[in-house]
Structure formats: C-alpha cells, structure tokens
C-alpha cells in the first residue's frame, strides 16, 4: 500500500464505533504514526449507520479522503450505506456468521461473535478489532494494553483482564494476515510526544489560554463538546461552568459575567444562537464584551443536527436589531483554533464588542496529531480601568471606545442601560443630541477594529494565475487537494478573519486571472460578503451543502473542472 492507509469502521449507534476509534487513534499515535480521524453519525441514540475514518500516514495528513483501504462494517446496512466508497482493492473485515456479504473478494472473515462470547460478552468484539490492527501495523501490544488499562480500570480488574485477552486474540489473528496486507508506512518516534486533538479541544484550550474563567451553554450538537471540555477543566482552572435553562439565559448570564469583570465563553449552534439575538443586541447597546463559539450545522430549523455546513455566516453577521460592530473569526486548523480563540477574548475586552469563533461539525469532530500549541506566545490582555468618582461608562471618545470599569473596582458608578443612554449610562430620548452622538460613537469602532484585522494567509506562489478562496474548515481539505494537484499557477487565499475583512482583500483578488471560492453552503455566503465589502464579485464557486464536508478527491476533481 501507499504511504497512507485509510481504515473505516461503520455500524449502528450503540455498537461501539467511537470506542474503537478512540482505541485506534491513541494506539497509532503512540506507535509513531501520523493520524487523521473524522466521523459522521446520524441523529439517533440507537440504530442507523455511523462511521469513522482513520487515516495513518508517514507524513502529516490533515484532510478527509473518501478512499477506503480497509473497511470494518459491523452491520449489513453499513456496507450498503458506504458501498460507493468501496473499490476492488478494499479489504473488508467481517464476521460472516453475523453479516451475509455476497461479495467474497478481498473479504477477511474474523469470528468476532464466537471469540467475544468465549471471553464473556459481545462487546469485546471491538477490542478484538483493535488488537487485529495493532498487529497489522506492527505496533507494540504493550501500548494497547496500557491504553486498555487506563480506559477500563474504573470498571474493575476483571473487565481490564478480559479486554486484554480480547486484544491478544485479535493480535494473533492480525499477525496471520501481515503477509496478505502489507503496509509500508514509516514510524517516527517524535510523533509519540505529539498532541492528539480535535477542533473542540483546540478551541477549549485556546479559551483557557485567553483567560476564560466562565462558560455557559445549553447542550446542542455539535457545540456541546466544547462545553463539556470546559466543564472537565473547571475545577483545575477555577472556571465557572453552568448548563443554563435555555439559550436566552445563556447569553444574558455571559453578559452579566463580563459586566462584573469576568471573561465568559458561550458555546452554541445555529438554532440555539437564534434565541440569543436579543442578547447579542444587548451586548451591542451596553458595549459589553462577549465571546461566542458558534458551531454550525445544516438548517433551517433542526435541519441535519449531526452533520456539517458553513451555513451560519450570515446569521453571525446580521444577527441582532440595529447596527453595532462585531468581529467574526473562523479557524481552519488546530493551531488557528487555539490562537484565534485566545485572541477573541483580548479583542472582545479591547473593543467591547461580541466576538464570534465559527466552527462546524466536521471541524469539531476531526482529530489529527500536532507537535505543539504555541501556549507561551499567548498574552492575556485586560482593558478594565479603576473608576473615579466622575467616571462615565459611555464617555464619548474619538475612536468610539469608552474606558470600561466594573462594579466595586474604584469609586465610580458603573451604570449600563439597554435603552439609548447618555455618557453616564442614564436613559435618554434626546434624539438629535446625545442619542445620535452615542450611535456615532459606537459606529466609530468599526474603523478602529479594522486596525486589528488579521491579514488573509496566502499559500502557494505569489505569482499565481488562479486563486482559490476559502474560510473555516475547508482550509485543510483545500491544502491537501493542492498538495495532490501540484500546479504552481494555483494559490490559496485563506481568511482566518471573515469580518471585518482585511484592507488587502481586493488586492489579492484583483491580481488573479481567475478566482474560485470554495464553501460548504448553498449560496456562497462568504462570496456575498466579499462582494458587499469590496465590490469584487467571485463568479466561480465550488459549493457543497448535502451535510458532508468536501473530500480531497472530490475537491481535486472540481478544481480541475474549473481550471
């Protein structure tokens, strides 16, 4: 096989697909292989078909490939659902006593049911598979044993011992097939020390680095994993974490936290954020900072709640009534997710505006190994002042940013009001006087914020003829596709900040003979934003909106068609 090996496991919810994924990605990383893993799953607790793709490589790999080298279906429905990804070279591992699969070519029959029942439970079939792959990829069985001990020790020594027996049985079977399935992927001991993270991990750690000391949410796929991560960290890092009764309470609790001097994170998805729009306007009027992680999923309404789409950019951009500034960041890889989330807290504090971190299901649930995160490069910046007796919360300034005080820090009164107000924070209806001055003060922040805009990142030769444009989770898949295409005339312009746009945006676009935008939504929402802000219309679009991310192969074909 090549320097990449793609393993796909699929079965019903409740059959332990995620358990096998967790075992294998940790085993392979600790054995010195570069790892990439992502999943797709149905919106149900039992039944349906869920799948996970694990790609092992001897070089860094960051994008999803459709191709399947080894397929492990735990149900006949799994085979039927993924048959389009099975080719003549795909090895299919099944228990023929449980699955009647007519195509016998390239089938490896492992009596999972019989062996697992001998050990004591059908659940051990997952550990047998893990042992099989441990042998196939020439890993140290002791590594797998240590992972099993850590995973199951809380359930008792008997469970640990039986899982180790299951792993050993699978290891023996895997050794018998090493001559049939030859894998030539090099190991690198340095990878053993790498971090293995998904998007939710990177965002959560970034929030910690950015000084986050509170997190509020109402559970909603796919944003919940960030919230549960923060709950896990809460005691060690002294974070206030609260599952609130609804999303209206979530945003208001976060605003209260920032008003009192905290740095709160809100984690939600489209339908939940829809309930926060009034609270977002409250942030705009009271000039109270807030950081919102918005994990996108297909809509409208409940839509496809466990699938992926870049469909909420307009929601983040235009949510709330009235006009007030905001910042929208959209990381494309783990390092950016860490850095941008940490930065979001400084930006919110500095400009006293809502700051969005945009992700999606694919980004949140995708794992790969990374050498390190630049934790030491992060500096937490606070912009709170100690108030004096003559303090004015909404003092009119040239740049629109008023000094922000908090209650009980100094001698001043920190008065805020959701109605239009004067410099002291008192309600006013002086329409052509102080009211208009306050509106203009807030609007001046737009220009000030542009001074901190993050410049888009250009990948490829600066003398490009064709320019690909992307944002968010398309980043890594586009880079993988370009690595395969190997065309020096094509460059890729990635926007880690999608609003406000950097002043050089039009310069990059006008330099190209052809510009192609790649988005995981139906209309090209970012293309529309670029046109509205720069006047440049991107006519060539590659769009996908069926609830799945682009695959590398698919994107290669679509790019080549366009050029």
Image: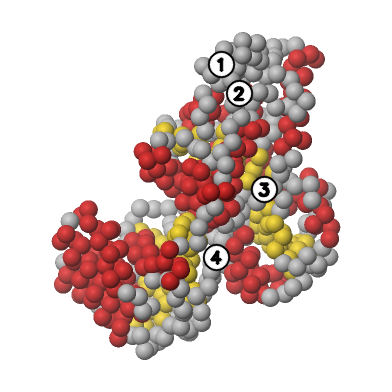
The structure residue drawn at horizontal position 72% and vertical position 60%, both measured from the top left corner, is 458
Quarter of the figure that contains the C terminus: bottom right
Instruction: Please tell me which of labels 3 and 1 falls first in the chain.
Output: 1
The structure residue drawn at horizontal position 51% and vertical position 43%, both measured from the top left corner, is 209
Residue 235 percent location from the top left of the image: 36, 38
Left or right, residue 118 beside residue 481:
left
Query: What colour scheme does the image use?
Result: secondary structure
Measured Cα–Cα span from mark 4 to mark 2: 43 Å
Residue 355: name its quadrant. top right
Left or right, residue 58 beside residue 533:
left
Instruction: Please tell me which of labels 4 and 2 falls first in the chain.
Output: 4
Q: Are marks 4 and 1 in contact (CB under 8 Å)?
A: no
Which dot marks residue 62?
4
Residue 560: name its quadrant. bottom right
The structure residue drawn at horizontal position 42% and vertical position 86%, both measured from the top left corner, is 182
Q: Residue tagged by mark 1?
A: 410
Measured Cα–Cα span from mark 1 to mark 2: 8 Å
Q: Residue tagged by mark 2?
A: 385
Q: Are marks 1 and 2 in contact (CB under 8 Å)?
A: yes
Farthest-out residue, bottom: 179
Q: Nearer the viewer's eye, disc 4 or disc 1?
A: 1
Which dot marks residue 391?
none
Q: Residue tagged by mark 3?
A: 497
For residue 101, above or below residue 151: below
Residue 148 percent location from the top left of the image: 27, 63
């Amino acid at each position: 096989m090549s320097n990449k090996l793609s393993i796909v496991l699929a079965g019903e919810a409740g059959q332990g697909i995620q358990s096998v994924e967790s075992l294998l990605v940790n085993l392979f990383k600790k054995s010195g292989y570069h790892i990439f893993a992502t999943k797709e799953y149905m919106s149900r607790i039992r039944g349906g078909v869920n799948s996970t793709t694990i790609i092992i490589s001897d070089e860094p790999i960051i994008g999803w490939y459709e191709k399947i080298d080894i397929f492990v279906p735990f149900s006949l429905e799994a085979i039927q659902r993924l048959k389009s990804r099975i080719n003549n070279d795909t090895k299919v591992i099944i228990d023929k006593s449980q699955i009647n699969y007519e195509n016998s070519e390239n089938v490896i029959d492992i009596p999972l049911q019989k062996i697992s029942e001998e050990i004591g439970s059908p659940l051990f079939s997952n550990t047998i598979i893990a042992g099989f792959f441990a042998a196939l990829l020439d890993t140290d069985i002791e590594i797998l044993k240590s992972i099993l001990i850590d995973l199951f020790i809380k359930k008792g020594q008997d469970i640990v011992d039986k899982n180790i027996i299951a792993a050993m049985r699978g290891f023996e079977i895997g050794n018998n097939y090493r001559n049939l399935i030859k894998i030539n992927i090099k190991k690198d001991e340095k990878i053993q020390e790498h971090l293995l993270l998904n998007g939710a991990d990177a965002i959560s750690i970034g929030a910690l680095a950015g000084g986050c000391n509170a997190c509020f949410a109402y559970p909603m796929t796919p944003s919940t994993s960030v919230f549960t991560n923060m709950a896990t960290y809460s005691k060690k890092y002294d974070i206030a974490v609260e599952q609130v009764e609804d999303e209206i309470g979530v945003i208001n609790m976060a605003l209260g936290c920032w008003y009192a001097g905290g740095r709160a994170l809100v984690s939600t998805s489209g339908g939940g954020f829809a309930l926060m729009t009034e609270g977002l306007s409250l942030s705009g009027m009271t000039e109270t900072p807030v950081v919102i992680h918005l994990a996108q999923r297909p809509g409208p309404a409940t839509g496809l709640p466990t699938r992926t789409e870049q469909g909420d950019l307009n929601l983040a951009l235009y949510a709330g009534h009235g006009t007030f500034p905001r910042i929208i960041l959209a990381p494309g890889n783990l390092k950016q997710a860490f850095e941008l989330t940490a930065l979001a807290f400084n930006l919110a504090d500095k400009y006293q505006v809502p700051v969005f971190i945009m992700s999606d299901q694919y980004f949140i649930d995708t794992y790969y190994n990374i050498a390190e995160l630049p934790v030491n490069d992060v500096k937490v910046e606070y912009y709170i002042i100690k108030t004096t007796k003559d303090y004015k919360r909404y003092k009119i300034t040239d740049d629109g940013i008023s000094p922000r005080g908090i209650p009980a820090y100094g001698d001043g009164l920190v008065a805020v009001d959701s109605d239009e107000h004067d410099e002291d924070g008192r309600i006013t209806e002086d329409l052509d006087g102080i009211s208009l001055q306050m509106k203009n003060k807030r609007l001046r922040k737009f220009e000030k914020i542009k001074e901190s805009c993050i410049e888009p990142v250009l990948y490829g030769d600066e003398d490009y003829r064709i320019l690909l444009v992307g944002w968010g989770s398309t980043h890594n898949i586009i880079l993988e596709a370009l690595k395969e295409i190997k065309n020096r005339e094509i460059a890729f312009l990635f926007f880690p900040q999608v609003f406000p746009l950097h002043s050089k945006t039009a310069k990059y676009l006008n330099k190209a003979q052809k510009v192609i935008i790649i988005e995981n939504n139906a209309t090209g929402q970012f293309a529309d934003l670029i046109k509205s802000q720069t006047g440049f219309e991107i006519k060539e679009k590659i769009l996908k909106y069926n609830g799945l991310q682009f695959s590398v192969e698919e994107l290669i074909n679509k790019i080549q068609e366009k050029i």
